[in-house]
Image (tube, rainbow, N blue to C red):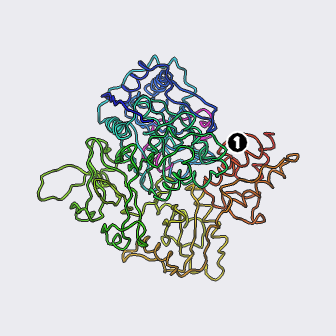
Amino acid sequence: MQVTHKMSRTNFSDLVDCLQLRSQNQSSQNAFTFLVDGELDVFPMSYQDLDLQARAVAAQLQDLVPAGSRVLLCYPSGLEFISAFFGCLYAGAIAVPVPPPKRAQMQSRLRAIVNDAQPAVVLTTSALLDSLQQSWLSFPDLPVVQWMASDRLSPDLAMQWQRPELKPDSLAFLQYTSGSTGHPKGVMVSHQNLIHNSAYIQTAFELDQSSVSVSWLPNFHDMGLIDSIIQPIYTGFGGVLMSPGAFLQKPMRWLEAISHYRATHCGGPNQGYELCVRKISPEQINQTQIDLSCWQSAYTGAEPIRRSTLEQFASKFQPLGFQSKFFYPCYGMAESTLMISGGVVNAEPVYCAIASPALEQKQVVTVADTDPNAKHFVGVGKAWLNTKIAIANPETHIKCPPDQVGEIWLSGSSVALGYWQQPEVTRATFQAQLVDSQSNDQVNWLRTGDLGFMRDGELFVTGRLKDLLILWGRNHYPQDIELTVQNSHPALRIDAGAAFAIDVDCQECLVIMQEVERTALRELDVEGIITAIRQAVSEQHEISVYAIALIKPASIPKTSSGKIQRQACRQQFLANSLDIVGQWKLPKAENLESSVPITLKAELTEESIAEWIVNRLSQLANLDPDEIDIDEAISRFGLDSSVLLNLTADLSDWLEQKLMPTLFWEYPTITELAAYLIELN
């Protein structure tokens, strides 16, 4: 059925004005529904409820701190975050969304963000408050803050709220998505930025009040916050939310929710679609009544978009009503609030095959799709509203000709104000000038750091100017991972390692190349070093390592000034031309798509539960069961969160009991976990 959209964009002055209007005109309408377990246990929130809760939070904040104060938002997935975020906007405060630490451990990145933002208040839930406070106090370098559990506030406080004076350039929040652990960068997003980018998204995706979204994206991520939370309020349609853990446990939950709520506007990074392709079996598709024909814009962005993923997803879920034209490849970043470019709704994705040898020389030479040297790219659309895109030579700042790859630059009202408390980096990134002798245009341009080209009005992103790693839509700076690796074992040399990504089965996978100390060569404990690296990276960065190459001292490629040449390291790794003294590669897990058969359980004991976990873990990670010590931390196996969530889902099916997604973080050894599960039964 062809859906006709009636665009009716209201000129809100800010998001406070927007939510106030929704509360007045659509008071009883559900603004959001949260699926507690990713399925149909729902908690709804009306616009009137959200406005009331936001005013209560704001009144308390106004009593504690002046307008312009930073407020750290540390929330799990759920509706409490939304009222807390809008409570900050209602108070004229600057929100700083961050992920809640696992087991209340203040990881180095979170501590760096806190020390950069210097919040005056920490807003969280009553369930997290005590453990967060205890963890906070264990780090004397963290600022002194006031603590507030938003779910303990009385609704009566809403009567005390006073509307703040907000200007278009007033800061709304700081989005910490880029910058290394040592130098975090908080993008300063203004109220005008949010209003403009919300109108931008509404226009590009043809959204109106009949639209529906279903999202599993995290609330602290720019895509999850702006598209899945702010956009439904801006346009006035219903948003359905689930936790990222619920999706990663069982991707089918997302598709079931899209079908059940007749969602029109949903999406995520490429790996989300890849996970659906890998983990949802043909049997599940044949046995389900899911109907995906309602899906009008299946957007994909936040990381490299792969043509093969789009084609495999469309083919696999075509029996459920999905069509390839539903895909909406797009491009964005926090420095531009969120969205930069996108295509046309109901149009097929645009593909382009470029000759690899030419691409290495920054030249755009198209070839046939079947050419053995072809590299395939997915178009990410055009700029909308007043946004302009330019392809510039990153060294000369001159516009590139159409057949040349350059850095993607942009200008427009969605471009954020800069980086918090970093004027020099802000000038370099947000205030670039194009060198053009035929123009006196002094427009400031945002340098994205991404490489790409324009063809027939379509933008194509080819890679990164710098060594940023993007895994599951999250930015990871290689120097952070390298430091974690070098601190994980005394046999590893400082400032002599590289972290980079390679393509494995259409996924970006992390590789570590690391020199060892000369004094450690004689009795090198390769197994111990590998285990230490995998555990440290898993615990500090929540990602898994695909391969590790331990190499001889003084053999890693460096510049004349001593900087690691990560691209040269990557090329040597792929060419097998390293001076290796020890290596490891993640075994291919053959059983990720299907879980352990659900057999009749004998009388449950701690021993029988532990045995089941050991057997399933050995299948998922391709480990010998004898290698798994039930009294050691599971993190020593270096598994990323998706594997642990998959294990939790299988365990839940076997026990026929709902289990929290954070199970393996709350109970880090199999012994502790088995003891906890016995108490539940």
Residue closest to the far front? 1
- For label 1, the residue is 659
447 up-or-down from 54: above or below: below
Quarter of the picture containing the C terminus is top right
Task: From the image, give the main secondary structure of the stretch colored magenta.
Answer: helix
Tell me what residue is drawn at x 55 percent, y 24 percent.
153
Quarter of the picture containing the N terminus is top left
**498 or 92, which is in the foreground?**
498
Residue 465 lies, in percent from the top left, at 36, 63
Residue 408 lies, in percent from the top left, at 31, 56
| Magenta span of residues | 110-134
Q: Is residue 554 left or right of residue 439?
A: right
Can the viewer see residue 69 in this picture?
yes
Can the viewer see residue 147 in this picture?
no
Q: Is residue 145 left or right of residue 163?
A: right
Residue 263 lies, in percent from the top left, at 50, 36
**173 or 619, which is in the foreground?**
619
